[in-house]
Amino acid sequence: MTLPQPPKALPCHFVIFGATGDLSALKLLPALYHLEAGGRLPGGMSVIALGRRPWSEDDWRRHLEASVRKQAGDRFNARTYRRFAERFSYLAGDLHDPELYRALSEKLCADQSCVDTVFYLSIKPSDFGAVIKQLDLAGLNRPRGLHRIVVEKPFGEDIESARLLNRLLHEFFDEEQVYRIDHYLGKETVQNLVVFRFANTLIEPLWNRNYIDHVQISVAEQAGVSGRADYYDQSGALRDMLQNHLLQLLTLVAMEPPPALEADALRDEKVKVLRSIRPIAEQSIHAHAFRAQYGQGAIEGASVPGYQEEPGVSSHSIAETFVAAKFYVDNWRWRGVPFYLRTGKRLAQKLSLIAIRFRHPPQQLFRETPLEFIEPNWVLLSLQPSESMHIELHSKQPGLGMDTRTVRLNASYRQGREKTLDAYETLLLDIMEGDRSLFLRFDEVEWAWRVVDPILRQWTRQRDFIHTYPAGSWGPPEADRLFDKLEQAWRNQL
């Protein structure tokens, strides 16, 4: 019998490795500030920022204020910021240098009453191993089982490296201490999907292969590599986005209702989905996955360079900036329903959308009327740039003719001027409260790598050619070959 675990104590230190990087400036620091403004940070918690830049405390505070002001906008409050800034101290050093960890240990041990620390690895994946080992050498992971370590994606670069990283983590930390973060799971629309599916008897009976024609999951970005060429050229869109973000969204669409809204119950159901995804045979990769790279083009009227012309990118690079793939979930609920996943950089607009298309009615009731062809019904869940949820139905237009129009039922949870909540605010609060429901268990990570591993192996061998698409487009038209039917097409608009 497994006894319930007692809730974790609130942490008294929050240590950010890579605090001067883009992720910290854009997401972590503003999210912590908003939690401060909402009175959600533990009262005595200090934040220790670690970075390579040889800054003084004053340099760091200028950077901190600039980051928070830029992201908070009109939500910035000078009094709240002063209280927030008092929590911080800054340590400069190299992540591989033991001196940095000795200095960190002195800061942490200065507070004898502190029993719980969060170590947040906002760093390149290639540095994860060095930091984990140095934390152990400095004794900062002890007493074992107490502190928390947060690992940003990607978790490994293939299935073998993911297993090695997991073994390294477990050598020095217990599984209950490890928080593998995927910020898409913190988005409120994603969490609302669970409520939409399982709290409505109107929806759940239709959520299966008898009524749903196919599912599309698209994450489109207008931005290019944005100074991340050294990482992105080794990773590509398949590792950077599809293996984690998009497959996580697929599991939430496809999973069975969990017996309880508990961390392991939710993750058990997601793993079942990943294990049910039909393996792609080597000879079928071409029919199930497509990659491409953006070339020169225009974004909102401004000319932008192609990927190979970006600073730090080789002129012979074949790293994919666009990937589309088709998967089948072979279980009772979904067998035969294609799941189309697509992500890319330098596309026409920023868009994260789950689009579920329903089958046509079996009776051709309107075949001898102007309504010989009726557009199918859709459920649309937008994650960005707006968070919303819609159901598209048909109704007759007023008048003498038999003409219809599409009407939208707004199923969004946010009303009026209700404020949006950044995903990192949710996830950081869960880390501090010890709630692991929205974080990945390793078997989820491992099975996600198993799903994409055949594609990765094939593309690693094929290094002589990659398709291109103009920046500002919706990607290469060749990606349409993945569709099972001529009537299926990418949904590019909410």
Image (tube, rainbow, N blue to C red):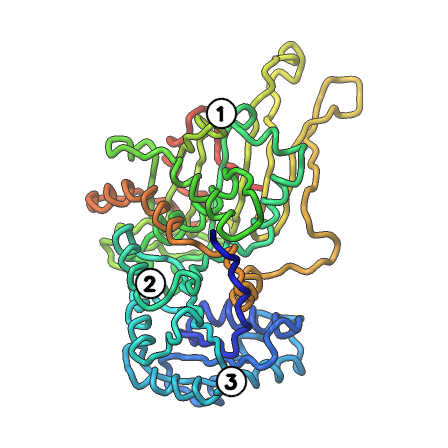
User: Could you say which is closer to the camera, residue 248 or residue 348?
Assistant: 248
Cα separation, mark 3 vs mark 2, equals: 27 Å
The percent position of residue 16, horizontal first and vertical second, equals 44, 74
Tell me if residue 388 can be seen: yes
- Residue 417 appears left or right of 20: right
Q: Quadrant of the C terminus?
A: top right
Please name the residue shown 37% across and 69% down the image: 123
Q: Residue furthest top?
A: 368
How packed mark 3 is, by other alpha carbons closer than 10 Å (few <14, some 14-19, many 20 or more), is few
- Element at badge 2? helix
Query: In the rendered image of this protein, does residue 214 appear above or below residue 364?
Result: below
> In the depicted view, which residue is nearer to us: 206 or 482?
206
Q: Earlier in the sequence, mark 3 or mark 2?
A: 3
Task: Identify which residue, 253 or 406, lies in the foreground.
Answer: 253
Residue 170: which disc?
2
Where is residue 385 drawn, in percent x and y? 57, 53
* Amino acid type at image mark 1: Glu
- The secondary structure type at the circle numbered 1 is loop
Above or below, 123 relative to 291: below
- Residue farthest front in this picture: 1
Amino acid type, mark 3: Ser
- How busy is the neighbourhood of tag 2: few (under 14 within 10 Å), some, or many (20 plus)? few
Residue 131 position (above or below residue 273): below
Q: Residues within 10 Å of mark 1 (few under 14, many from 20)?
A: few
Hey, what amino acid is under mark 2?
A: His
Q: Can the viewer see residue 295 in this picture?
A: no
Which residue is disc 1 drawn over? 487
